[in-house]
Every structure is written in structure tokens, then in C-alpha cells.
Image: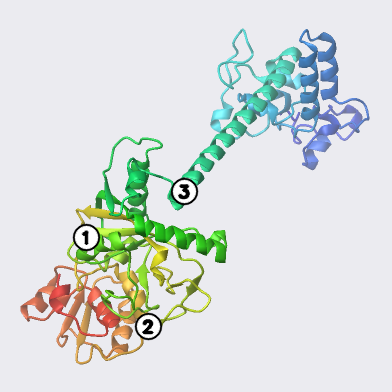
């Protein structure tokens, strides 16, 4: 905006001889020097320039009465808008800018000479707009003529069009919000159908009437068929599998078996209704949890349901249960992988946790806490279910092409070392490493200093390179590794330390060899 002569060129102090500021009483500037160089008349109660513009349009504009009324409303809004700092000489080309800021319509002599002392926001805004004949609006929302070069009628039309465009875009936004809300509602209904067992595959309704268990094989498809129950089930199982899969294990989901066992489904739904009545609706929604077990156990569980400790046919795979004597589930894929033996199959179940008791520490083999329906580990990664009616086997996920440090069986690196380390820290002191001298090599779950503290807590010792009896490393080669192998000293992975502590016994070195 033209601010007139600079202070160095104009030192007049007589207000009568000073030029009038183009913004007049509405001037937004705060620089004292500006007020020494320009006269600012006091605000008058007379009609604002915006109102004058409205009156002018009312008498001269050939548009319909409704257009005049709309423009009058727009003019009222304009008077409430903040002033554009470039005023009548505004160089902006975006039409919506004129619906966001007001611009003085009174031209001054300085408006014609092209001078402007304001700083541009960017180099792009600094470029001059080429003047073209015809419409004052070009394609889209961009102007082809500078505001200062427009006639009064063109400016009025510009402001009117700008407000109309703003209202149109606001309406489009509202419509988009409605579409998003409808999609959210559709997704919510889909989840509700799944929770209530209403998302049925073709043939599932008939399968629910049988006495035997039916397995529906679901394969990945490139094209997504909206509303397809089979694809919805596959993608749900697949996304749950990958959602919390961490570490350096990268298996691929090959296929999914959707399990329909009528007697197990009936038992689960009945328990869900009772839980809703006793605890309230918010406690009756299931979560999806993984369960890892031997391959021989998977189909019997799917067909007959789970067995809890104390029931006939139940057998502990490892211990009596760190956080209670129940059936263990996890939302973390790798956590449940630790219990797989002899297969690449993992169960995914709907589980009703109800009211959950969060264990503050280990409670080996404990029964269900009074007033609760399930237990959760301190790290919140293990959920313990005591009533098998609260478990519905839904999917068997088949995976392969596992790349990374993953090995099936009790001795391998069955979970990421970070989690194993966290679990090992919760165990009380022991003598499991008595007589063993450790050397550590490579980056591990914690600093070597903290790991040696853990080893000492369980009876082991820190050794020198010359005296160690066990080398724990994350590296497969190197001088230290070669030296240990040449001396027939066991070279094992990091998981060996944690698994020995967790099982409270010395495990076989060969199961953890690199």
C-alpha cells in the first residue's frame, strides 16, 4: 500500500499540509512515523463505504431483487472483515481472498502511479498480473486483473462473486462431512454385525444349523469387493495379524480359515448376553486376541472350544500361569507366536474380557480375582480368560516366508527380545546361571551394564575375553565369535538369557545357536 513520502524526504509537521492516509479513520498501521506523514480524519457516524456500496448497487444494478438482498448481506459481512494490508492496490489473484478481507474502494492518486512500499509475502505474489480484456474472472478462482485496476462496478461484482464462491465451498465441505459421517456409520454397523455374529458368509447360516464345525477358506484377492463378507473377514484377520507385529520377523499371510462351530458360537453368545446384563453393554463387546499352541491342538479347540485349568483334558504347556490359571491371549502377534510348535498357524479369537483386573506383579497360578472377569499382565500385553464360554475361535491364520530371527519350538527366539527382557526383569532372583561366566557382544535390549546386573541377579558372572564360558551375541561373525567357536565355547543369541530366567532353568545351548 502506498504510504506516501518517506520520513527522510518529508519532515513537515503541519497537519494541514500533510496528505490524507488512504485508509482514513480505518487505518490499521501502528508505526508512529506513519502518523507524522499522513492525516487521519476522525471516525464519523456516517454510513460506511460498504453501506454506500450497497446503496449504489441497490439503485443501479440491474440484477434481481434477491441478488440485491444477497449482496446487501455480503456488504454487511464485508464491513466486519479485517482490512487487507494492500487495500485497493491488492495484487492477490485468489478470488476467496476477497471474501476473507475487505478492501477500500476509494482510489487515491497513489493508486495510479503503481508505487507500493509494503513488503510482499513471497516472490510469487510479487509477480505482476497480466491485464486481459473481457471477464474480470478467469478459470477457477484466480483473477486476471489487479484490484486497483478494476472499475467500481467490477469490484462490486468481484466481491459478490467471492462471497458466492465462499458459500459454495462451505456447502461442499458440509456435504463432504455428511458423506464421511455416513461412512463412519456404515463401518460402525459393520463392526456391530461382526460383534453380534451377523456378518454372515455365503453358507454360514446353513453351517450354524449343523452339529459339526465348518471351515471357510478365505484367500487374498487383489480387487476389493465392497460389502463382501468373505473379504471383510479375511482383511480383518490379516490387518489384525500385521497391526501389532513388531521386531525383525516379517511373515506373509497365505490364507485364513474362518471357523464356524455351532455349539461354541451358541455358548459364546449366551455368555455375551449374561455379561451385558450383569456388567452393562460397554463390557459386552469382544476384542480380537491371538492364541498360539501346538498344531495338533488347533482344530480340536475350534470344534469343541477351549479348556481352562482344572477342566478334564487341560494340560499346561509351560508354567502354571504367571498372571493366573486361565487361558492366555494377546493382541500382539509375536507374543502368541512364542507358543507355536511345529506349524505356521495362529489362532485368532473373539474374547470377552468383561471387567479386567490389572495385575501389579506376578501371581503364579492364582484364581480369578473376586469381582472381575479376567486378568491382564502389568505390560498390558497378555489377557487371561478364566471362563471358556467367553472365547470364540474365529480364524486360523496360515503364514509363511518368515524372514528374520524366528524359530519354532520352545528354545528359539520366540518373541522380540525387548518384551522377553521386560518379562525377565519381573522375575525374582535365582541361581539359574550359577557357574557360568558371560561375555556380551552387539546391541541388545538394554545396555551391557544393565544386562550384566540381570545376569548377576540370577547367579551368573561377568567374564573377561579370556575367561568367559558363554558368548551372548547379536552378531554372526567377527573375531570374538570366531575365537569362541574355535575354543568350543557356546555362542548363543540374546534370548537365551531371558528364556532361562523366565523358565528358571538352564536351557540347551543348541536351541539358541546362531
Q: Which residue is tagged 3?
A: 191
Whether residue 274 is visible here, answered yes or no, is yes
- The residue wearing badge 1 is 404
Q: Nearer the viewer, mark 1 or mark 3?
A: 3
Name the mark on residue 89. none
Please give the name of the residue rendered at 35% of the width and 73% of the height, measured from the top-left corner: 308
Give the position of the N terminus as an image quadrant.
Answer: top right
Residue 114 showing in the rendered view: no
**Local crowd at mark 3 within 10 Å, few (<14), some, or many (≥20)?**
some
Q: Residue at x 20, y 57 (%)?
A: 403
Residue with the mark numbered 2 = 364
Label 2 element class: loop
Q: Nearer the viewer, residue 500 or 190?
A: 190
Residue 418, given in percent of the width and then of the height, sits at 33, 70
Where residue 104 appears, as percent x and y from the top left, is 77, 25
User: In terms of secondary structure, where does tag 3 sit?
Assistant: helix
Amino acid at each position: 500500500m502506498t504510504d506516501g513520502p518517506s520520513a527522510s524526504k518529508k519532515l513537515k509537521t503541519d497537519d494541514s499540509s500533510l496528505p490524507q492516509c488512504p485508509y482514513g479513520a480505518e487505518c490499521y498501521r501502528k508505526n508512529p512515523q506513519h502518523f507524522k506523514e499522513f492525516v487521519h480524519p476522525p471516525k464519523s457516524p456516517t454510513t460506511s463505504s460498504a453501506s454506500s456500496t450497497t446503496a449504489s448497487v441497490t439503485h443501479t444494478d440491474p440484477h434481481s431483487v434477491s441478488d440485491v438482498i444477497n449482496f446487501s448481506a455480503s456488504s454487511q459481512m464485508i464491513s466486519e472483515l479485517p482490512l487487507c494490508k494492500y487495500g485497493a492496490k491488492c495484487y492477490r489473484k485468489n478470488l476467496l481472498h476477497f471474501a476473507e478481507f475487505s478492501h477500500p474502494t476509494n482510489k487515491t492518486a497513489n493508486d495510479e502511479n503503481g508505487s507500493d512500499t509494503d513488503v510482499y509475502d513471497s516472490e510469487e505474489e510479487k509477480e505482476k498480473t497480466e491485464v486481459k480484456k473481457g471477464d474480470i474472472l478467469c478459470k477457477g478462482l484466480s483473477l486476471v486483473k489487479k484490484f486497483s485496476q478494476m472499475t467500481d462496478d467490477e469490484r462490486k461484482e468481484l466481491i459478490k462473486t467471492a462471497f458466492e464462491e465462499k458459500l459454495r465451498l462451505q456447502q461442499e465441505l458440509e456435504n463432504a462431512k455428511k458423506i464421511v459421517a455416513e461412512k463412519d456409520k456404515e463401518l460402525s454397523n459393520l463392526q456391530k454385525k461382526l460383534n453380534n455374529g451377523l456378518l454372515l458368509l455365503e453358507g454360514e447360516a446353513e453351517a450354524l444349523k449343523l452339529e459339526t464345525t465348518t471351515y471357510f477358506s478365505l484367500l487374498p484377492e487383489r480387487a476389493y469387493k465392497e460389502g463382501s463378507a468373505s473379504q471383510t473377514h479375511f482383511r480383518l484377520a490379516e490387518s489384525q495379524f500385521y497391526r501389532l507385529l513388531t521386531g525383525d520377523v516379517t511373515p506373509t499371510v497365505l490364507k485364513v480359515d474362518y471357523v464356524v462351530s455351532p455349539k461354541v458360537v451358541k455358548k459364546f453368545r449366551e455368555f455375551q448376553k449374561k455379561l451385558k446384563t450383569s456388567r452393562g453393554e460397554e463390557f459386552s463387546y469382544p476384542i480380537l486376541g491371538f492364541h498360539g499352541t501346538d498344531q495338533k491342538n488347533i482344530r480340536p479347540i475350534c470344534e469343541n472350544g477351549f479348556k481352562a485349568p482344572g477342566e478334564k483334558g487341560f494340560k499346561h504347556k509351560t508354567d502354571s500361569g504367571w498372571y493366573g490359571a486361565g487361558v492366555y491371549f494377546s493382541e500382539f502377534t509375536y507374543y502368541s507366536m512364542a507358543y507355536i510348535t511345529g506349524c505356521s498357524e495362529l489362532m485368532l479369537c473373539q474374547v470377552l474380557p468383561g471387567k479386567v483386573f490389572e495385575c501389579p506383579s506376578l501371581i503364579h497360578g492364582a484364581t480369578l480375582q473376586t469381582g472381575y472377569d479376567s486378568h491382564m499382565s502389568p505390560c498390558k500385553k497378555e489377557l487371561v480368560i478364566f471362563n471358556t464360554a467367553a472365547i470364540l475361535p474365529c480364524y486360523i491364520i496360515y503364514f509363511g516366508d518368515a524372514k528374520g530371527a524366528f524359530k519354532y519350538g520352545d528354545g528359539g527366539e520366540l518373541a522380540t527380545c525387548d518384551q522377553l527382557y521386560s518379562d525377565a526383569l519381573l522375575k525374582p532372583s535365582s541361581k539359574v546361571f550359577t557357574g557360568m561366566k558371560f561375555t556380551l557382544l552387539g546391541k541388545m535390549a538394554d545396555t551391557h551394564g544393565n544386562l550384566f546386573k540381570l545376569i548377576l541377579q540370577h547367579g551368573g558372572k561377568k567374564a573377561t575375553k579370556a575367561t568367559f564360558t558363554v558368548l551372548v551375541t547379536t552378531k554372526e561373525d567377527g573375531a570374538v565369535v570366531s575365537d569362541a567357536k574355535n575354543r568350543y565355547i557356546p555362542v548363543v543369541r540374546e534370548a537365551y538369557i531371558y528364556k532361562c530366567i523366565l523358565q528358571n532353568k538352564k536351557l540347551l545351548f543348541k536351541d539358541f545357536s546362531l
